Image (tube, rainbow, N blue to C red):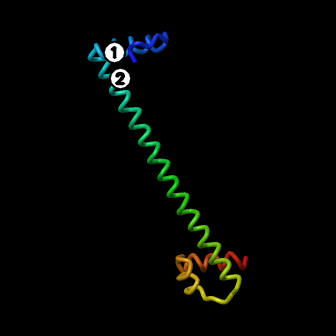
Amino acid sequence: MNNLAYPPVQKAQAKLRAMSADEQERHWAESRARALSDEVTLLNEAHKDGHKEGHKEGDQHARRQTALALLQKAQFDIPTIAICTGLSEGEVRELAVGQTN
């Protein structure tokens, strides 16, 4: 790798050698590398949290849609719909009231 004749590579290698020789420069380079790594970790965690939240909202929406369909059929009472959908009876009542308005 040290035998590469490409000028940008030679320049980067020279800069790396100079930075490695200087204790303070090495400290700053390591600090920057840690900060960049931390930033990537935080962004990945935020992405995962957002993904989980999206799934929760999607699941909630699907349960509400199922409850509405069951209410429209008028074959089930509110407690039964609540059990089947995982919604609370209060949420099913709100859907039933919203459906009549």
Q: Which residue is pictured at 58% across the width and 63% down the height?
A: 58
Question: Of all residues shown, which one is farthest toward the left?
Answer: 23
Which residue type does callout 1 highlight? Answer: Met
Residue of label 1: 19
Foreground pick, 47 / 7 = 7
Separation of disc 2 and disc 1 at Cα?
Answer: 8 Å
Foreground pick, 13 / 84 = 13
Q: Position of residue 44 (x, y in %)?
A: 46, 45
Tag 2 and tag 1, C-beta contact below 8 Å = yes
Q: Which mark is residue 29?
A: 2
**Where 5 sits versus 80, above or below?**
above
Q: Residues within 10 Å of mark 1 (few under 14, many from 20)?
A: some
* Secondary structure at numbered mark 1: helix
* Secondary structure at numbered mark 2: helix
Q: Which residue is pictured at 60% across the width and 80% down the height?
A: 93
Q: Position of residue 42 (x, y in %)?
A: 43, 43
Q: Quadrant of residue 25?
A: top left
**Where 8 sits versus 101, above or below?**
above
